[in-house]
Image (cartoon, grey):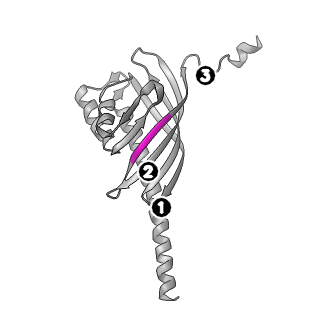
Amino acid sequence: MADGETEMRFAELEARLAEVEGHRAILDLKSLYGTLADARYTRKGPRSTSEIEAVADQLADLFTDDAVWEGGAQLGRCEGKDAIRARFSEPTLHYSWHFFVKPEIRLAGDRAKGTWDVLALITTLEGRAVWMVGVEHDEYARVGGRWLHTRMQLDSQLMAPHDKGWAPKRPAESRA
């Protein structure tokens, strides 16, 4: 094999490896985001103010300085790492457990876009158990060798009371 061909193959392998590593790093980033978002709560309610602030610091560090976090009409919008930190420093729920599934991640050099389905089990501050289903549209950048969120936008599809479900009428009720 000629030296030029070997170099080309190595370059191709390096590019493929960088894409696989980027994909993996973004999966880990989203997993950590979900873990930290839920770490602000226990089944008994929000953690102490100091614990929540420590978690909010860790959450904010998953975003670039100029990142945008959009939670839609119900959850609001934050621009910049400091605003994101402040948003996560205030408990907005009694409890949450997020599941991010079906990732679609598209890398382009030091940038990437991702789409995730999200299911969250939520207890509101008023004590209501709620299902939340949505889609998150994320954008990422590799900064200093580390993948970070540059934009996170939640498109909430439904918020349904746990005890009533999400269907207007249950099938058995509609046949009666």
Q: From which residue to which does the magenta span run?
A: 149-154
Alpha-carbon distance for marks 1 and 3? 39 Å
Q: Residue at x 51, y 89 (%)?
A: 2
Q: Amino acid at mark 1?
A: Glu
Q: Residue furthest top?
A: 176
Alpha-carbon distance for marks 2 and 3? 31 Å
Tell how many labels: 3
Question: Which residue, given by chain and number where applicable, does mark 1 sit on?
Answer: 19
| First in sequence: mark 2 vs mark 3 | 2
**Considering only vertical position in the picture, is 74 above or below 59?**
above
**Considering only vertical position in the picture, is 129 above or below 102?**
above
Q: Residue at x 40, y 46 (%)?
A: 150
Quarter of the image containing the C terminus?
Answer: top right
Q: Amino acid at mark 3?
A: Trp
Q: Amino acid at mark 2?
A: Ile
User: How far from the left and from the top, in percent, is residue 94?
Assistant: 38, 21
Number of the front mark, 1 or 3: 1
Question: Which residue, given by chain and number where applicable, does mark 2 sit on?
Answer: 26
| First in sequence: mark 1 vs mark 2 | 1
Label 1 environment density (alpha carbons within 10 Å; few <14, some 14–19, many ≥20):
some
User: How far from the left and from the top, in percent, is residue 43?
Assistant: 38, 24
Foreground of the two, 108 or 100:
108
Element marked by disc 1:
helix
| First in sequence: mark 1 vs mark 3 | 1
**Considering only vertical position in the picture, is 146 above or below 135?**
below
Element marked by disc 3:
loop
Alpha-carbon distance for marks 1 and 2? 11 Å
Element marked by disc 2:
helix
Label 3 environment density (alpha carbons within 10 Å; few <14, some 14–19, many ≥20):
some
Label placed on residue 166: 3
Q: Residue furthest bottom?
A: 2
Q: Quadrant of residue 170?
A: top right
